[in-house]
Structures are given as C-alpha cells and as structure tokens.
Image (cartoon, rainbow, N blue to C red):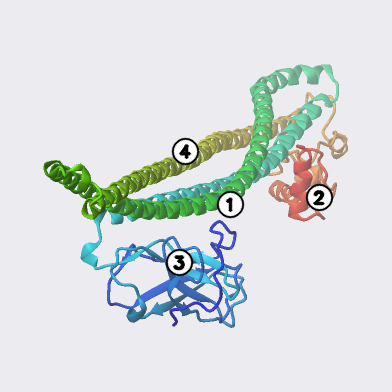
C-alpha cells in the first residue's frame, strides 16, 4: 500500500476500447466508515492479468492515474489464459480509506503499463443511517430495467426453441403421413387388381347362348353390387389425390417455416451483439449521469459559496458606503479653510477614500464575473443533462420497437405453425377414414369373389351346361392376378381336380405356391416400393429411400 505515485501522470481516455475489460461487481452506493472494504471484479478474456497490476481508489473527476487516494496490488493468476472471465477480489484496510468528506470515489483497474482497464460506479464513505432514500431508489430503478430486458431476451430465446421443437414434431408427422399414403396406395392397387381380375374372369367365360341366358341375371346382380363399390373407390381415389395435394402444400409450408426459422436465428444472432452493446451503452450513460450529478452537486456547492461571498461583499459595500457618507458629513462640517487643503491629514483621508472606492469597484466587478461564471456553468449542466435524457429516451424507444417487431414476427410464425398443425390433424382424420373405407371395400370384394366362385361351381355341375366340367376346362380359365381368391372349403368343387394356384408377388414376381393371402400381403409390404415411380428400393437404407421419395415432390 502506498500514498504516492511511482510514475508520471498519464492522461486517460474515458472512451477507450480497453476501458471495460474489467467489470467491478456489487459496488454499493456507499461504504460504512471504519470497516474494511472488499472489492470484487471480473476480468474478461481480452485481458491477461499481471503481478504489477493494481486497483486504486480515485476521487470522481480525476484526470491522471497518479491522482489516487490509495491503491492495492492485485493477485496474479498464473493458470489464467484469458479464454474465460475470471472473478477475483482484494481488500482495502480501513486505515487507508477516505473519511466522511462528502466526496464520491470509484475503483479503477490500472495495468502494468499505466492504462486504465476498468472503472466502477461512484460511491462514498458514510454511515448507513446517512444514506438517502433517493439514491437507493435510483439504483433499484436501474436494476429493474436491466432485469426486465434480460427476461425479455430469455423469453424470446425460449419461444424460438419451442418453435424449433414444433417444427421437428411437424416433420415427424409428415413422415408418418407419407408412410400411410404409401400403404394406402398399395391397398388401392390391390383393390384395383382384384376388381380387374373379377371383370376379366367374367368376360372370358365360354360363349354359349344357353350359358349366357343363365348367367345374365347373375352378372347383372354382380355389376349392380359392384357399382357402388367402384363409385366409392373412385371417390376415395379423388380424396387420395386431394390428400397428396395437401401434403405437398404442407411441405411447402414446412420449407417456408424452415426458412423463417433460419431468418429468425440470423436476426437473433444479429440482435444479440446489438443488445449487449446497447446494455453497455446504457451502463456507460448511467455512469455518466451519475458523474454529471456529482458535478452538478459540486457546482451547486461552488455557486452557494460564491453567493455567500457575494452577500458578504454586498454587506462590505454597504458598510463602506455608510463610512463614505459619514466621512463626507464630517468633512462638510469641518469645512477647513482654503489654506488647510494641503493639510497632510486631509490628503491622507482623501487618498484612503480613493483607495476604498477602487477596492469597492474591483469587488463589484469580481462579484459580477463570479455570478456570470456560475450562471454559465449551470446552463451548460442543464443542456448536458437534457442531451443525456434525450439520448436515453431515444435508445429505450429504439429497443422497444425492436422487441415489438420481434414479438410480431414470432406471433406470425406461431399462427403459421398452428395452421399447419390443424391441417395435419385434418389430414390424419381423412387417412383414418380412408383406411376404414379400404377395409370395408376389401370385405365386400372378398364376399363378392366368394359368391362368384360358388356360382361357377354350381354351373359346372349343372347337366344343362353344354360343356361338362373337367380338370382341363378348369385349367383353361384365364388366370387372374395374384389377388384372386380361392374357395376349396365347400362341397361345390373338387380341390384335387381344381389344383392349387401359386401366389406371385406383384413387385419381385417371385412365385409362392403354398402360402396364404395374408402371408402374400405381408411379403409385399416388406418391400420398399416408391409410391410415385414403383421402384423397388430393398437394397437402399431408410434415409436413402426417404430421400428418393421426397425427390419426386421437388
């Protein structure tokens, strides 16, 4: 600890870029008397501490690093590399600290090259009972504003994270919808193949007038029964096309949302440094305001002192005027003769009177000059205070506009996400309805196919038929696609004579003679088939297969 400077005075630029490399933490408005003072500070990553750095206590308004009141050497951290902020503290003993002199002081961090790396807010030394309520209110109001802006920034970041999660959920739902559409297309192809197989089987029956006459009512009934199902199938196909259009539209909206999210991230990345800079500017302006208030108090004290001196000078002036009047009265009463004008006493009084008049004029001029200087300083302080208030109001208005604009953009994005969610729910309901309709149509087609097989078996056993039923004739019937239905369970036909037809996969064209219809459907669903170009992608990975499917939508 020392009370003198080792080096010459060095002028410090208060606006230097290195002035905020050290931030002092938890500096109160005042410290109690006769107690030790703990100074906590944080060093940013731009400063490497040295064992020759020190922290001094300066009176507010200092202009040179040697004009400290007292100082303390800092503790160097050998492991610190300057990558992350470092928080440290030092202690000032009470015997070296200022007393209750009504002045304001501040901590300043000075490095080994006599450059100021940081300064604290002003504080004073007084008893706790002497702390005014106005000072506490000023600090509380400023802290509330800073905390409010921090909460607003955290809320914006939370909202952006929630929007990203919603986009991920929407993407997963879209993938599920694509998989459901793939299964729906397979089921539709299956239904279409069954319907075509039945129609082809009916058209390829042997031409015979008697057989046509007997089968005409049955065919009419089948056509009448299948007509509503065909219409329903066409309606489902139209709904399916509409669903595909909706999915394409949702993909476009998803791409738009992704682009909007990227723009939001870019805007947040751009606004974060501006917000930090604005916060630093706000802290600097607050420090300047506090310094200006201290200067105003000093000027007010000086003005009061000058006014007191002016009043004293006025009193002296009145006293001197009364003395002059008394001297004039005394001289007029004495009225010395003409010969006594050269009397030494009269000459002495005359000279004293002239000196008093000169001193009086000088005091009047000095008083007028002091009043002018005080008025000018007060006007300058008022103008500076008004400028600082205008800058503060303009900065707060600009930040409020930026926050309002960000909230507006977030509201628009939330509305778009909500519309997409509702569209997804509607599409999911339609897909569920499609599944129910497909299951119902499959059941009806199975029943119609069973009836058709039973009718053919009865006609083969009818003695009026011109062509007897035989295994050869049975084998000459046109073979339908893999989705034809057999009925070897009833007494209408001989299973041994009819033979077993092999099931053929419509994707890989592989024959399976001894499997059921359900096993064939399970095998076909195990293939990775593109719903747009029907390309088999069994050798591709899941991600590669999805990329191939999405490429058709671009």
**Disc 3 on helix, strand or loop?**
strand
Residue receiving disc 1: 273
The answer to whether residue 415 is above or below residue 279 is above
Q: Which mark is residue 260?
A: none
Image quadrant containing the C terminus? top right
**Disc 4 on helix, strand or loop?**
helix
Q: Classify 10 Å Cα crowding around label 2: few (below 14), some (14-19), many (20 and above).
A: some
Q: Quadrant of residue 243?
A: top right
* Label 2 – label 3 distance at C-alpha: 65 Å
* Label 4 – label 1 distance at C-alpha: 18 Å
Tag nearer the camera, 2 or 3: 3
Residue receiving disc 3: 24
Residue at image location 59% in from the left, 35% down from the top: 427
The answer to whether residue 237 is above or below residue 395 is above
Q: Earlier in the sequence, mark 2 or mark 1?
A: 1
Q: Quadrant of residue 173?
A: top right
Q: Which mark is residue 537?
A: 2
Q: Classify 10 Å Cα crowding around label 1: few (below 14), some (14-19), many (20 and above).
A: few
Tag nearer the camera, 2 or 4: 4
Labelled pair 2, 3 in contact (Cβ < 8 Å): no
Q: Position of residue 323 (x, y in %)?
A: 17, 48
* Label 3 – label 4 distance at C-alpha: 28 Å
Residue receiving disc 4: 397
Image quadrant containing the N terminus? bottom left
Q: Earlier in the sequence, mark 4 or mark 1?
A: 1
Q: Nearer the viewer, residue 91 or 306?
A: 306
* Label 2 – label 1 distance at C-alpha: 49 Å
């Amino acid at each position: 600890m020392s009370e003198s400077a080792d080096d010459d005075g060095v002028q410090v630029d208060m606006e230097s870029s290195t002035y905020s490399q050290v931030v002092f933490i938890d500096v109160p408005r005042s410290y109690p008397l006769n107690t030790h003072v703990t100074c906590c500070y944080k060093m940013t990553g731009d400063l490497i501490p040295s064992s020759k750095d020190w922290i001094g206590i300066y009176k507010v308004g200092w202009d040179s690093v040697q004009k400290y009141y007292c100082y303390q050497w800092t503790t160097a951290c050998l492991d610190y590399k300057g990558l992350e902020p470092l928080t440290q503290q030092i202690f000032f003993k009470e015997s070296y600290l200022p007393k209750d002199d009504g002045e304001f002081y501040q901590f300043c961090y000075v490095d080994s090259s006599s450059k100021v790396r940081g300064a604290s807010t002003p504080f004073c030394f007084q008893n706790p009972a002497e702390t005014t309520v106005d000072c506490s209110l000023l600090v509380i109001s400023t802290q509330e504003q800073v905390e409010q802006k921090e909460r607003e920034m955290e809320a914006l970041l939370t909202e952006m994270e929630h929007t990203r999660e919603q986009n991920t959920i929407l993407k997963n739902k879209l993938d599920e919808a694509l998989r459901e559409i793939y299964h729906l297309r397979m089921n539709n192809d299956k239904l279409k193949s069954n319907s075509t197989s039945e129609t082809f089987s009916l058209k390829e029956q042997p031409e015979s007038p008697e057989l046509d006459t007997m089968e005409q009512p049955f065919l009419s009934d089948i056509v009448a029964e299948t007509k509503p199902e065909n219409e329903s199938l066409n309606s489902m196909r139209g709904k399916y096309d509409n669903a595909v259009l909706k999915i394409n539209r949702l993909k476009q909206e998803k791409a738009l949302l992704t682009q909007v999210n990227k723009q939001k991230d870019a805007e947040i990345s751009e606004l974060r440094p501006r917000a930090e800079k604005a916060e630093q500017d706000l802290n600097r302006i607050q420090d300047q305001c506090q310094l200006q208030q201290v200067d105003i108090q000093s000027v007010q004290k000086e003005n009061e002192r000058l006014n007191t001196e002016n009043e004293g000078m006025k009193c002296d002036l009145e006293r001197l005027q009364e003395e002059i009047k008394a001297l004039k009265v005394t001289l007029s009463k004495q009225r010395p003769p003409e010969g006594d004008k050269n009397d030494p006493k009269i000459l002495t009084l005359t000279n004293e009177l002239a000196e008093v008049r000169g001193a009086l004029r000088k005091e009047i001029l000095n008083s007028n000059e002091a009043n002018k200087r005080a008025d000018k300083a007060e006007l300058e302080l008022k103008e500076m205070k008004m400028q600082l208030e205008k800058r503060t109001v303009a900065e707060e208005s600009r930040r409020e506009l930026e926050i309002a604009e960000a909230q507006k953009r977030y509201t628009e994005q939330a509305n778009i996400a909500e519309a997409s969610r509702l569209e997804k729910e509607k599409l999911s309901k339609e897909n569920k309805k499609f599944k129910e309709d497909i299951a119902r149509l499959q059941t009806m087609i199975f029943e119609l196919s069973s009836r058709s097989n039973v009718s053919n078996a009865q006609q083969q056993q009818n003695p009026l038929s011109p062509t007897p039923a035989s295994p050869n004739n049975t084998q000459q019937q046109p073979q339908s696609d893999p989705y034809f239905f057999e009925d070897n369970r009833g007494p209408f036909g001989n299973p041994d004579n009819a033979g077993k037809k092999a099931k053929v996969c419509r994707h890989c064209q592989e024959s399976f003679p001894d499997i059921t219809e359900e096993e064939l459907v399970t095998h076909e669903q195990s293939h990775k088939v593109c719903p747009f170009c029907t390309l088999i992608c069994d050798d591709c990975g899941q991600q590669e297969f999805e990329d191939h499917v999405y490429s058709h939508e671009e």
